[in-house]
Image (cartoon, rainbow, N blue to C red):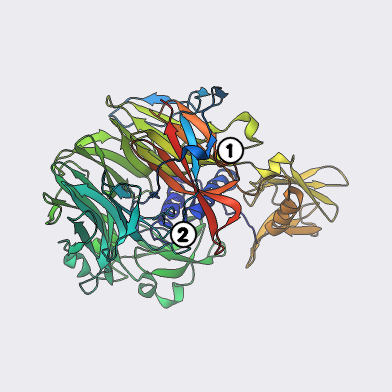
Amino acid sequence: MNTPHRPHHSLEHHLADRLADRAGHVELGTPMLDVVVGRGRQRQRRRRAAVGIAAVVGIAGGSVAAVAVLSRPADPDRITAAPTDETTPGTAGASTVPGPTTPTATESVPTEFAPSPFTWNRVDPDSTEAVSFYNGAPDDMVAGSGPFVVWSTAPAVSDDYSGVLWRSDDGLTWEQVAAPPALVGRTVAQYNGRFLTYGTAPATAAGRRSDLAIGTSDDAGRTWATTVLPLDTSELLAEQGVTSVGVNATSIAATTTGVLVTAQVNANVDLTSKLPAEVRDLGWDLTESGVRVPTGEGCDSVTPTTISFGGPTTTVAVAPDLLTCASRIYTWAELGISEAAAASMMHPEARMLFSTDGVTFTEIEPIGIDAGVTDVRLTLLGDAFVASANRLSADGSNTTNLYSSTDGRQWTSLGSPPVTWVEGFGSSGDRLVVTGYDIEADTQVIAVRDPSGTWTTTSINSFVLPTDGVQASMGGGSFAVGPNGISMVGALFVDPVAEVGGVMLSIDGLTIEIDDTSYTHRVIDDATGEVLATVTWETSSNPELVTVSYTDMGPRMEVRREPGGDVVADYTYEDLSNAVADATVNVVPTGPELFLLHSADGITWSRESLDEIAGATVTGTGGIRITDTQVIVAALLAGERNPNGTPKQTLLIATPTA
C-alpha cells in the first residue's frame, strides 16, 4: 500500500529523518544507483508529502558515498559530447554569508548557467576495470599520485559489492591486492610514501563490537600489515546497562606533520528488555531523561518498526504522535541504565588518535573543539587539518562547527557552515566545500567558504529550469571535490500528478481532486458541487464531514454529507495511489533525469544532462571522481546489460577545455 507518511514539522523530526537517511549509507551493500534514486525520491516526498518519524539515536558514522573509478585515460575516438557555447538561463545562483561567525542559509540569487567547461568522452570499461564503488566513509577513496591505492568493488560485470583493494603503478593498469587488511568502514591515505587504510577490525576484546585498526603498506600497496589502535572503551563497557560498545572509524587525513584519525564510540543497550513487559509493545520514545511510554489516553495506533540504537537492530513499536498523548517516563535509573551509558547511547562520543609515522597511534584530547560533538570528519586545507563536527542538542536541534588545526591537538574554530547537517565535506584549492540539508529553507545546499571566511551558498533546487516540468524539484546525489572544482549529480524529478494537470477519482457520487503527489485532495459532492473538506497529510479541514480514522491497514477517510449523518463513502490512500498510477502511466518518466552540476569556484555553475553526454538513458550513477586532469562519472545505462545480466556501466570522462 502506497500511503504517505504523517507530517512532523518539528526540528527534531526533520533531523531524525535526515539522520535516518544518513544511517542507511553506513554499511556496504547498496549500489549507489539505488542510493541516489532512493534519496531523491525521499526528498521529493519530504517536500510535498510529509516528514516521517524515525527513531534514530545512534548517529551514523559520518558517511557519504565516495567513488573509486579505475580507468584508462579518455579515448579521443569515443567523444560523445562537447562543450556548448550557449548559455542557459537558469536559477543556479549564489548568496554570500560573512564568516567565520555562524551564518544562516539564504535564498540564492538568480543567474545564468555557464557553458560546459568540458570535453566529454565515453569509455565502456572491460572486465578488468572496476567502476563500481565502495559505499563507506567520507574520505577520498583514492590515495597516491602514482602509484595509487583505492578501495572499490569488483569490476562492473559483478553484482558483488564487497570491498576490494586495488593498486596501480600508473593509474592505467590495475590489480587486486591479494591479501588486503580485513577492515570495515575502509578509507585510504598516503603519508611520506606509506599507504594507509583505516577502518575497524573484528573485535579482539569481549563486549566490543569492533576495534579500530590501521593497515599499512610500504611497497606501493602490494602487501599489508594491520595494527589495532589503542582505543580504550573498558570504562564505558563497565557502565550499568551496557551490553557492548560500538566503535566506528569515521575519518582519516594526513599532512606533513602526521596522520590523524577520528572515531565514534557508543554504548549498546538492550532497551526492550529493560522496559516492563506490559509496556514494551505500547510504543515508546526516547528523551534525555529516559524512555517515554504512552498510558493510553489520546494516543493513535502504533506500528512496529525495526530500528537500531547504535547496536543490533530491534523491532519496537514507535508511536508517531507520542508527545500528544498521555504518557510517563521510565527514568534511566528505573531501567537500570547509568547516566553515562544513556549519554553515550544518545550522543555517541567522538575520539581522535594521532601518529607521526602512520603506524604508532596515540589517543589525544583535542583542545578547542566543543565538548559533546560527534560525527567528526576530516579533510585537508593546504597543510592543515579541518574537522567538521556535529553536535546534537537535547531539544533535537543540531549544530555543525568547523575547526582548523596544524597538529591535530590545538584547534581554531572556523564557525558554522550554512547547513543544518553536513553530508559532503572536502576542499578544492583554498576553499572548503560542504553539502547538506538546510531544514529552515527545506532544501539541499552546496556551500563554499573562501579564504576570507565568506560562504557562498547554492540551493540544489536552484538548478531547476522553468522548462523542466510542473512542480519539478532536484535532489543531490554523488558529490566530489578536487583540483578541478566541485561536482555533484543532480536528480531532477517532475511531479507526475501536477504534470498531467491533476487526477480525479469518482466514488459514490463524490469527486476527489488530487493536485500533486503530496496527496492533498478535495472531496466534492457531485450533486451540489460543494467542497466538503480538504484533506492535507491525513488532516481534514472539516472532520465532521470527512473523518480520518486509522486501522491496521492505515488511514481511512469516511465521508458524510451532514454532521452526524450516515457514511456515504470511504476511501484509503491506496485508492488515491491507484488512481494516480492509472492517470500518469506512460505520461511522465517514472525515474529522475540525472545531471552533472559543476563549478570551479562554487559561484558559477554548469548543468549537463548525463543522458546527452552518454548518448543513452542513464538510470543512475555510481559516483564521481575528480582527478588533477579529469572529472569521471560512472553511469548505469537503461536497458543495457552485461552478458551475465548485471546492469551495464560506462564511464563518462570530462576533460577541461581550458
The residue lying at 39 percent from left, 29 percent from top is 600
Task: Name the residue furthest right.
Answer: 527
The kind of residue tagged 2 is: Thr
Q: Residues within 10 Å of mark 2 (few under 14, many from 20)?
A: some
The kind of residue tagged 1 is: Glu
The residue lying at 63 percent from left, 52 percent from top is 538
Residue 363: x and y, percent?
14, 55
Please name the residue that numbered disc 1 is placed on. 612
Q: Does the residue at mark 1 contact the one at mark 2 (Cβ under 8 Å)?
A: no
Closer to the camera in the image, 16 or 75:
75
> From the viewer's perspective, is 116 left or right of 176?
right
The residue lying at 50 percent from left, 39 percent from top is 77
Please tell me how many numbered marks the rendered image carries.
Answer: 2
Q: Is residue 396 visible?
A: yes
**Quadrant where the C terminus lies?**
top left
Residue 202: x and y, percent?
26, 69
Please name the residue that numbered disc 2 is placed on. 30
> From the viewer's perspective, is 265 left or right of 315?
left
Residue 386: x and y, percent?
24, 40
Is disc 1 placed on a helix, strand or loop?
A: helix
> From the viewer's perspective, is 174 left or right of 232?
right
Q: Residues within 10 Å of mark 1 (few under 14, many from 20)?
A: few
**Quadrant where the N terminus lies?**
bottom right
Q: Above or below — where is 31 with respect to 459?
A: below
Q: CA distance from mark 1 to mark 2?
A: 26 Å
